[in-house]
Amino acid sequence: MDMGGEVGVVIIGAGPSGLALAIELGSRGVSCLLVERNERVGYAPRAKTTNVRTRTHLRRWGIAGKLAAAAPFGIDYPATVSFVTRLGGYGLTRIENHSNINSTRNELYPEHGQWIAQYTLEQVMREHVDTLPSVSIRFNAEFVSATQDAEGVAVTLRDARDGTEQVVRCGYLVGADGARSAVRDLIGAVLKGEYGLSRNYNIVFRAPGLAQAHPHDPSVMYWQVNPVSPSLIGPMDKDDVWFFMPTRLPDGFKITPESASDLIREATGIDLPYEIMSSDEWVASSFIADSYRDRRVFLIGDACHLHPPFGGFGMNMGVADGADLGWKLAATLQGWGGPKLLDSYEVERRAIHEEVIAEAAANHSVLSNDFWTEALEEPGEEGDRLRREVGERIYAAKQREFHTLGTVLGGCYAASPVIAGEGPPPAKGDTRVYTPSSRPGCLAPHLWRTDGGSLYDAFGPGFALVTTPDADARDIRRAVENAAERGEPLAVVALAAAEATDRYPLPLTLVRPDQYVAWRGRRWSGDALALASGWSEPALPGVPQRAEQLA
C-alpha cells in the first residue's frame, strides 16, 4: 500500500479489538491500514477464554474452525475450574463447563467457547487479515499525531526502526491502542473509575511433569486457596507451558525468575524445576472513558474501557467493539449507512461496557484469599468436614464468574438511536442464564434449523429479514424493493412454523449485520431500514416508540 495514499480507516493497535475491526472492514471490501508498534502480534500472553460470542464472530468470518484446530489440548479438553488448597494438596470443589467451553451442540449459540491463549487467537486473526486484499498491516510503526477536518483525518506515523515519519490520509481513525491509548489522549477523552483494585502478576512458566505430579482431574484452571500464595494456576499451551497468577502479594514484593519459581513451588506444594518464561505485572482497575469519539476518531477495546479479568470479558468485549463499529463504518463509507449510524456506536457499546464492568468488579471482590480458613489443610475427618463447607461456599459464590451466558449474550441495545425500541427492557435477572428474545435491541435468537444448519449462517453480511409463515408475501416483496431502492444489502430468511415457535413470535423481524434485532412487526414499514441504517428516527407503525420519544 502507498502509505501516502488515502484509505478508508486507519486502526492503531493490532490486538484482538484492532484485528476484529480490520477483519470486519476487510470482509466488506473497505480499505484499511492496521498499525502496530511491535514487530508482530501475539507478543504477550494475556486472556485465555474466547467466549461463545467471539467465536460466533469468528464463524461469520470463516475462521472459527481454524481456532478450534489450534487448541493445544484438543477441543474436548475438560472445561473445568477446580478449587484446591494447593495443586499438590486437597480438592475443595469443581465448576464444570466454564464459559460454555464444552463442545456439545447448544440451541442458544452456534459456537461453543474455547480455552486458548490470546496470542494464538491473535495469530489466527492476523493470518486471516493477510488474506483480505483491502487490509494492510504495518508493524514497527508508532502513532504520532492526527488532525481532522470535515473530509477526513491526516494521521502521522513514525517508523520505530529508523524514525522516519509519513502522513496517511483516511476517512476515519480508530484507537485500538490499549490502556495507555495515545489516540484517547488525542481526542481528550479521560478514563474515569477506580484504580488499583489489586496488584497482580501473570507469570508464564514451563514445568515438564507438572500435569502428572498433582492428584486432581484435568482442568483449565486451578484456584489455590492457601495462606502462602492464594492464586490461579493452569495449563496454557503445549510443551508443558503453564500460567500462574498470584491474587495477593505483599507490598513491595518483586518478581524475579528466582522468586517466581520459589512462589510457585510454595503455592503448589510441588517441587519441580520451574522455568520462568515471562512475567507481566498489572493492576486491576475499573475504568470507562468519558467519551469514545471525536467526530472522525473513535476508541475501541481497552482504549475506552478497563476492568478486572475475572469472568473473561475484557478481550471478548474488545472484539465485539470492533465488530459493532466495523459494519457501521463500512456502511457509512459505502454510502448505505446514514449519519445517525455512527452516533449509535458509543450509545450501544457504553451500556454493555457498564454492565460488564460491574459484573467483573463483583467477581473480583471474591478471590482465593477470601476462602482461606485455619485447618483447611489439616488431614483427617475434621479437615474433610471443613473442606466440604468451604467448597460449598466457593461453589455458591463463584458460579456466576464461570457461568456467564446471561452477561455474554443477554446485553440489549434498548436506548440506541437506530433501534425501534419497545420501551425499557426487562430487568436483568440471573447473569448465569440467557433467555433469548427477538425484542429490538437484543441479540437475534439462535436456532438450529430443520436441515441442521445454523440460522445465523443464513443472515449473510448485510441486514436479514426473518419471516414466519404468517408473514404477508406483499410485505416481504416491499421490503426487498425498499432495500434495493436504498442500496442496502438484505437477505430474506424464511422460518418454518416449527422453527419460529416462541423465539420469533412476530411475522417480520429485521436483523442487523451484527446479528442484533433492529425492528419487528406484523406489517412491513419502509421506515424500518431507514431507522436501522441510521437515516432517520421515525415512529414505526404498529411498534411502540422509544422511551425518549414518548417522554
Image (tube, rainbow, N blue to C red):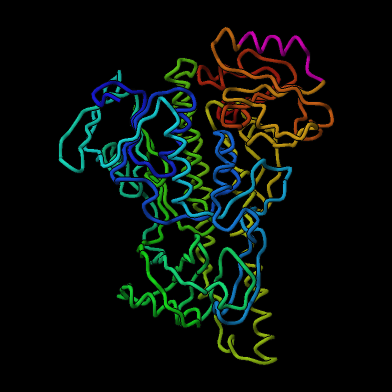
Q: Nearer the viewer, residue 441 or 92?
A: 92
Identity of the residue drawn at 68% across and 33% down: 439
- The picture places residue 180, in percent across and down from the top left corner, at 30, 49
Q: Does 325 appear in magenta?
A: no
Identity of the residue drawn at 49% across and 16% down: 336
Relative to 539, is 33 above or below? below
Q: Is residue 343 visible?
A: no
- State whether the magenta stretch is mostly helix, strand or loop: helix
- The picture places residue 359, in percent across and down from the top left corner, at 54, 55
Identity of the residue drawn at 66% across and 32% down: 456
The residue range painted magenta reads: 470-482
Identity of the residue drawn at 29% across and 46% down: 38
Q: Nearer the viewer, residue 27 or 350?
A: 27
- The picture places residue 500, in percent across and down from the top left corner, at 79, 30
Quadrant assignment for the N terminus: top left
Relative to 358, is 497 above or below? above
